Image (spheres, helix red, strand yellow):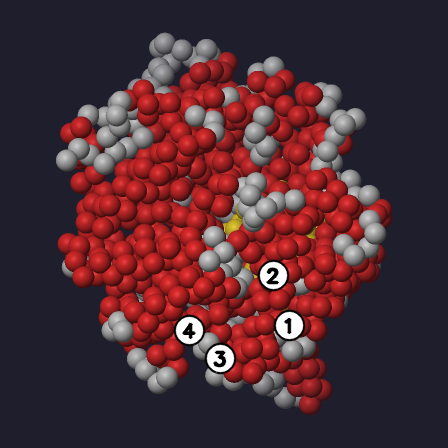
Amino acid sequence: MPPLWKPENWPSRLAELEARSGDLKEAPLRRDVRSLGTLLGDVLREQAGEDLYAKVEELRQSAIRRREAQAGSAIDEAETLMQSTVFKISGFSVEQAYQLGRAFGFYFELINLAETNHRKRRRLSSQLTGDTHSQRGTLRGTLSAMRRAGISAGAAMEWLGRICVVPVFTAHPTEVARRSVMFKRRRIADLLEQLDKIPISDEGLEQLQQQLTAEITALWQTDEVRSRKPTVYDEIQMGLDFYESSLFATLTPLYQEIADALASEYGMEIEIADLPLMLRFGSWIGGDRDGNPFVTPQITRDAIQLARAHLLGEYRRQIQLVIDLLTASTQQAPVSEALRNRLTEYIGRLNLTEEAVFGAQFEFESYRRILACILARLEKTLSADKVAEENSSLAALPAYGSAREFLADLDLVRSSLVEHRGLRLAQTLLDPLLLIARTFGFHLHTLDIRQHAKLQRAALDEAAAWSSEAAADGRLPAPLSAPSADVIETFRAVAEIKAQGTPETIRCCVISGATSVRDVVNVVWLARLAGVRVEAEGEDPGLMPVPLFESIEDLQNAPAVCRELWSGPEYQRLLASWEGHQEVMLGYSDSNKDGGMLTSTWEIFRAHRALHEVARECGVHLRLFHGRGGTVGRGGGPTHRAIFAQPFGAFEGEIRITEQGEVLNWKYSDVVLAERNLELMIAACLDALARPNALDPEGHRTGILLPEWEAAFNELSADSFAFYRESIIDDPEVLQYFEAATPVGELENAKIGSRPARRKGALDFSNLRAIPWVFGWTQSRLLVPGWFGVGYAIQRYVRKPEGLGILRLMMREFPLFIDLIRNVETALAKADLGIARLYAALVQDEEMRQRVFSKIEQEFNRTMEAVLLITGQGELLETNQVLARSIRLRNPYVDPMSLIQVDLLRRKRSGEDTDEVNRAIAGTINGIAAGLRNTG
């Protein structure tokens, strides 16, 4: 039998890569999915037996037939197929259900990898065919639009110089897969990429196929469900893995792409060393203690040390590479006087001669000798005065006082090379190292401290109360409560970290649940009490309080709160030390839970616009931090579209965006994917700054908000908010239904994150986090947070004489409305009312079940009709066939897992609450999350 990936001929394989549209473009993906499915089938038969494989195929084929019947409006046939499958599943043992859930989950693993490989393949194809010149979301496409709009090269460089994109890695909700599973994914991904090489011998194809089969076997024999919750250390390590797997290696090709785009569109010849720095990184993992008691001050210290260790490892590798390759001899090419003086200075500090330090090593090779000194100083800086044994003769050299000193030394080496006919050497060997050093400094990423305003307020009040009372009575103060002591100890840890020589590591304290000026001022008080310098001074950027406005009411009040804050003379002195900069965070998840999708989207937009207006009034340079989740119900969706949808004229070029644990692997597991994702964000910022569409006399989607569109959005939001609050928040039956008809109570068993899945106490909206709220509805296939209330508002608005015309025009021209409707459309397309009805059957109170489900079903149908009416489509995702195909591909595997999960939940709630049942449920949770590509 020939290898599964053997082509009819190799030119046809090249034609697939060059194809721009049609079946030929998608043929490689279909081949990968089909071939991987075949290999998994072989593994299942070998590892679990023919009986399990037969059951998998039976369930899959049944799901396909049901979907086909549903698409053909054969509702009775679809329902019959559903009930037949449910009956079969009810006869399975718990072990069989567990194994079946695993099997379908592994199909998802492979489908996800095939789709990811196809994204990389199409990225390469666009580069080969030149599609990047006009493709939206690429640097070349954006620069091309700018040039056509009459924006000069100088203006383009000025815009680029204002851009600073900061992806902030967070652990919640964390990646469902274990770290060991992620490593196996990468090995399979590497093998798939090798299969795309042209040509490969039959023997080579067969060998790669055997390696894939071995990796799939290893994956099957690995526990996909954690036996324990990940620790915060696990999450820290998982976040750091992405630097080594992609981010370190991504920077040079990313900035080279920017330089090439400038050359292509503007004829500018610019080196990457001369490009402005447009990218930095941040993290919450190890610093976010809001609701996570396991994030202790020691964890924060350790998170920073682990980051520094990863960074030192990369610097060692890079510098050693340069030492190995930069063998220029002063007998062949001289070095600069400045470099020679620096080397002499270093040798002088050792109180030895150069020969005594180096002996015969690197004779006449001044570059290698100074790089050895640089490496020794770097090791001493990043590893607590420890120098590697091979550099022991240089151990007396001092640690670097700052990353700026390190960069100065590297610049010295580069300048010497350029001065002495070594430009190509500088570009090849020094520029990648310089780019990494400029981006990551001595800290890799900034680590935000995050805590809830209520806890900080209580800690400050408690400290003030007992100290004043004790002083008045002449008594010793009583110990602080544990939560208050933790708050104060956290700030002490910050002071300690900053004093250790990397003050830039912690720059911000994010205040969850901020509602007032006092919440911001409390952070300043607590920081100063613990010895933290709040003002910026020298290398220390200080500690900036960053209010996070989360509820609808808080978003509406945010501009007034910030005006009061920024107008205060004391705070203005702090602003002056920060060079007038202030960061404010907008919360997507909680505002959605509080007011629904439509109102959350609109109020975030309005707060964004108003905050920039207030900032201009107060002379503040505002940077917004967007707390977007991975799923649509938590602010997710295409990043370029979301950035471009920012208010016109309310963007300064700097933006921070959370990258949730569940999407990190999707975006950063590979150099090609990471480069594309980061380029997309930079291009979107450039597009939002320059707005070339607005300079075109016939420009469309300019971002300009017309008065009638604002009036329409106001009316839509008001109607949606009232309906959402009445139907969801104010109806106590909804939460009862939610707890019974979704696996939200089983989230803890999935062990997907270190943070407790829910707050203590009875379930109500005040203590229900946004993550389990979205998670429960996603698992039960309703995805309510992604669309509820939108259909009601649109239906009311289109009754107006010009209502439909206005909304259709907004759908063509206004980026925010486009982004909203497309995100709603995606949520609707992933939902399935037929399967959701099975989850509803878990609710014991039949009358309550019918009332809640009917309400949800009515709004679902109303929203789907509204989306189709506004978009003019005949079906959902008609104009996004890539996503439509992906969902169609996944449904035959998601559906059986949902049915298995419902059956297991029914068993558990009937009294079969065993470890085996809980493990099987956890397996379905992981599998459905992988299938829908959403945790919560």
Circle 4: element type: helix
Inspect the image, locate mark 4, and give the three-letter code of the amino acid beneath it: Glu
Mark 4 and mark 2 lie on one chain; the one further toward the N terminus is 4
> For mark 2, what is the residue?
861
Circle 1: element type: helix
Label 2, label 3: how far apart the Cα atoms are = 22 Å
Inspect the image, locate mark 2, and give the three-letter code of the amino acid beneath it: Asn
Q: Nearer the viewer, mark 1 or mark 2?
A: 2
> For mark 3, what is the residue?
843
- 476 versus 607 height, above or below: below
Inspect the image, locate mark 1, and give the three-letter code of the amino acid beneath it: Ile
> For mark 1, what is the residue?
728
Could you say which is closer to the camera, residue 6 or residue 411? 6
Q: How many circles with numbers are drawn on the protein?
A: 4
Q: Residue at x 70, y 73 (%)?
A: 726
Mark 4 surroundings within 10 Å by alpha-carbon count, few (fewer than 14), some (14 through 19), many (20 or more)? some
- 113 versus 800 height, above or below: above
> For mark 4, what is the residue?
746
Q: Nearer the viewer, mark 3 or mark 4?
A: 3
Mark 1 and mark 2 lie on one chain; the one further toward the N terminus is 1
Mark 2 and mark 3 lie on one chain; the one further toward the N terminus is 3
**Tags 2 and 3 in contact by the CB under 8 Å rule?**
no
Q: Nearer the viewer, mark 1 or mark 3?
A: 3
Circle 2: element type: helix
Mark 1 surroundings within 10 Å by alpha-carbon count, few (fewer than 14), some (14 through 19), many (20 or more)? many
Query: Percent from the top left, x then y, of residue 6?
Result: 23, 30
Could you say which is closer to the camera, residue 570 or residue 846? 846
Mark 3 and mark 4 lie on one chain; the one further toward the N terminus is 4
